[in-house]
Image: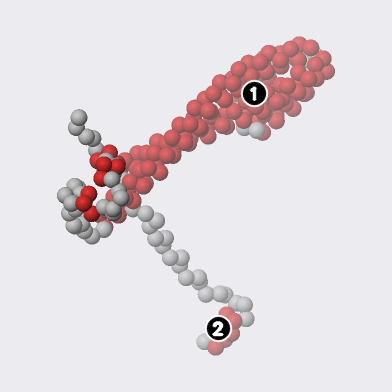
Amino acid sequence: MENAMENDSAGGIAPAPAPAPEPEPSGPEPSDMTKQLSQKHEMARAEYDKLRDSEKRVHMMRKQLDHLVALGDKASGEDLSKAASRCVAAGVDAKQMAVLLSEAPGDGPALANWARQKDEVLQGVEQQLESMLKDAKFNLGLNAMHVIAGVAMDQHAQKMQSAPAQSAPAQSATPPINALNTMPSGVDAGSVPDTSLMMGGQTNA
């Protein structure tokens, strides 16, 4: 027993760490409405992320095509292969790039003109994605606000359920009859604002 204790103190096998305490719940159980709102928010997030990824891939393809256009008559099949490899490394589908390469002409001006045409097509796609991303971002923020409101409503409902019932003493909604008679001297009773208007009430004509 003493040797075992000495081994532990000398840097031997350390005792197993105590299990981590289970996290305490941070709030009430979400209601069915809040769960549905959270699911809609997750769907909006997935749609937004998907559009962002598409935008990045299209931007990368345009960048490589712009490079081929800049080369002009010096553009070659080797340059095109390098550009395609960079696009695939950035996440562009390899099969899609293979089809694109099969449509490319030979070296020189023909390849540069082909790259320019493809670049114009992708420019239109990029503009469409920009508009779709704007709508998706708005939808994502709107769904996030709905979730926040749902959580707040759940917390308020739990607080109302857990709070003890308290009966407040009933108060008269109308002022005492002698209220105007108790005002300080020098104050005209006719100058007192209409309290019914302050409280949002309406006066009958």
Residue lying furthest bottom: 2
State the residue at coordinates (39%, 39%). 146
Label 1: element kind: helix
* Residue 200 figure quarter: top left
Q: Is residue 173 left or right of residue 113?
A: left
State the residue at coordinates (74%, 27%). 82
State the residue at coordinates (57%, 75%). 13
Indicate whether 149 appears above or below 66. Answer: below
From the viewer's side, name the closer residue of 96 and 60. Answer: 60
In what quadrant of the picture does the C terminus appear?
top left
Q: Which residue is mark 2?
A: 4
Q: In the rendered image, is residue 172 in sight?
A: no
Residue lying furthest front: 186
Label 2: element kind: helix
Q: Is residue 190 left or right of residue 11?
A: left
Residue 49, image x and y in percent?
A: 53, 34
Residue 35, image x and y in percent?
A: 35, 42
Q: Is residue 144 left or right of residue 180?
A: right
* Residue 184 figure quarter: bottom left
Q: Which residue is mark 1?
A: 97
Camera-near label (1 vs 2) is: 1
Indicate whether 150 appears above or below 73. Answer: below
Q: CA distance from mark 1 to mark 2?
A: 65 Å
Q: Is residue 24 left or right of residue 15?
A: left
Indicate whether 112 appears above or below 90. Answer: above
From the viewer's side, name the closer residue of 144 and 172. Answer: 172
Q: Are marks 1 and 2 in contact (CB under 8 Å)?
A: no
Residue 77's disc is none
Residue type at mark 2: give it. Ala
Residue type at mark 1: give it. Met
Decide which of tag 1 and tag 2 comes sooner along the chain: 2
